Image (cartoon, helix red, strand yellow):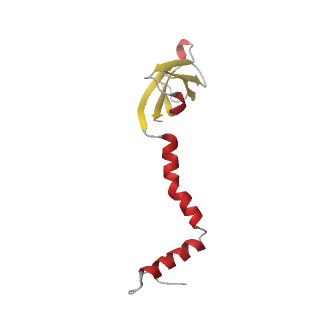
Amino acid sequence: MALNIHQVGATVGEIEDAVQEGLTAQGYTTARATKVDSLDAAVTSRLGAIVGIDRGTILVNTSSGSLTNTATVGAVNTSRAVLSHLGHTIGSNSDVIPKSRITLTNSTTITANAETSTGAYDVTVSYELVEYGG
């Protein structure tokens, strides 16, 4: 049933039928719609509300021979926390290509590891730690 839903005088029922026909033609079904409607609740229930966010940086001084350093953060539930690597910067030489990674070592410690392609430089690693409630 092709219907111009902008036509003057179309009833609500006719418009609903036209919309349903269009959705069905695109592969949408009542079963899919129900799943999509409950998706937001499922995602929210798995993560819960954000309890806290901690952002910071860790300086890894590779010039001192160290390839790791740590940051101490407030205690988090490690099974409900997400640690994100926000990037890194290098001290004084833009030609150096650093590599870095971070790990939530335990409930209060983030460990940063860094290496440089040549030489020894200061690498500042940025992180974000988000804890979700249960």
Residue at left offset 53%, top offset 12%: 64
Residue at left offset 53%, top offset 58%: 36
Corner quadrant of residue 21? bottom right
Q: Position of residue 52 (x, y in %)?
A: 41, 32
Q: Position of residue 25 (x, y in %)?
A: 60, 74
Relative to 96, does residue 37 appear above or below in the rendering?
A: below
Q: Position of residue 116 (x, y in %)?
A: 58, 24
Corner quadrant of residue 106? top right
74 or 14, which is in the foreground? Answer: 14
Residue 82 in sight: no
Residue 23 in sight: yes
117 or 53, which is in the foreground? Answer: 53
Q: Position of residue 49 (x, y in %)?
A: 43, 40
Residue at left offset 59%, top offset 70%: 26
93 or 41, which is in the foreground? Answer: 41
Q: Residue furthest bottom?
A: 9
Q: Residue furthest top?
A: 64
Give the left or right position of residue 74, taking residue 79 as reference.
Answer: left
Residue at left offset 49%, top offset 51%: 40
Q: Residue furthest left?
A: 8
Relative to 39, does residue 64 appear above or below in the rendering?
A: above
**How many labels sit on residues?**
0
Name the quadrant of the N terminus. bottom right
